[in-house]
Amino acid sequence: ALTAFERVVAPFDGVVTVRNVDVGDLVRADNGGTPLLSMDQDSLLRITVNVPQKDAVGVEPGVRAEITVPQMPGRRFDGFVERSSVALN
């Protein structure tokens, strides 16, 4: 009767980032709203970057961006500027 609940399926593809229960843990419906796990969608990432003032000219919504990270040498990620802040640091 409860076999329909033995499998948890996410509504989107992604990566489990936090697991709050382990295999064999008792899970109850009245656990106070504690999630079993947290997921992040990995097909679309939002990043925040600091751009020096001298380089900020032309950084505006819609501009294409190429992202590189030291942890993945030689790998480039295409993106675009969604918004920019006028805050100065």
Image: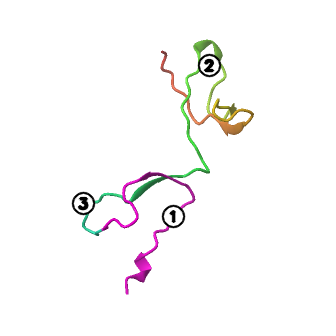
Query: Are the residues flagged by discs 1 and 3 in contact, CB closer than 8 Å?
Result: no
Q: How many callouts does the rendering have? A: 3
- Residue extending furthest front? 24
- Name the spot of residue 88 as percent of width and height, x first: 49, 16
State the SS at label 1.
loop
Task: Tell me which label, 1 or 3, sits earlier in the chain.
Answer: 1
- Tell me if mark 2 has few (under 14), some (14-19) or many (20+) residues whose alpha carbon lies within 10 angstroms of its own: few
- Name the spot of residue 78 as percent of width and height, x first: 70, 39
Estimate the spatial distance between the alpha carbons at disc 2 and disc 1, rounded to whole Å.
38 Å
Question: Is residue 2 highlighted in magenta?
Answer: yes
Residue found at x 63% / y 12%: 54
- Tell me if mark 3 has few (under 14), some (14-19) or many (20+) residues whose alpha carbon lies within 10 angstroms of its own: few
Query: Are the residues flagged by discs 3 and 2 in contact, CB closer than 8 Å?
Result: no
Question: Viewed as shown, does residue 84 lie left or right of 22?
Answer: right
State the SS at label 2.
loop
* Residue at image mark 3: 32
The region drawn magenta spans 1-27
Residue found at x 67% / y 22%: 58
Identify the mark at residue 56; answer none if there is no mark. Answer: 2
Choose mark 3 or mark 2, whichever is in front.
Answer: 3
Q: Amino acid at mark 3?
A: Gly
- Residue extending furthest bottom? 1
Estimate the spatial distance between the alpha carbons at disc 1 and disc 3, rounded to whole Å.
22 Å
Give the image quarter of residue 27. bottom left
Q: Relative to the observer, which residue lies in front, 62 or 28? A: 28
* Residue at image mark 1: 11
Chief secondary structure of the magenta span?
Answer: loop
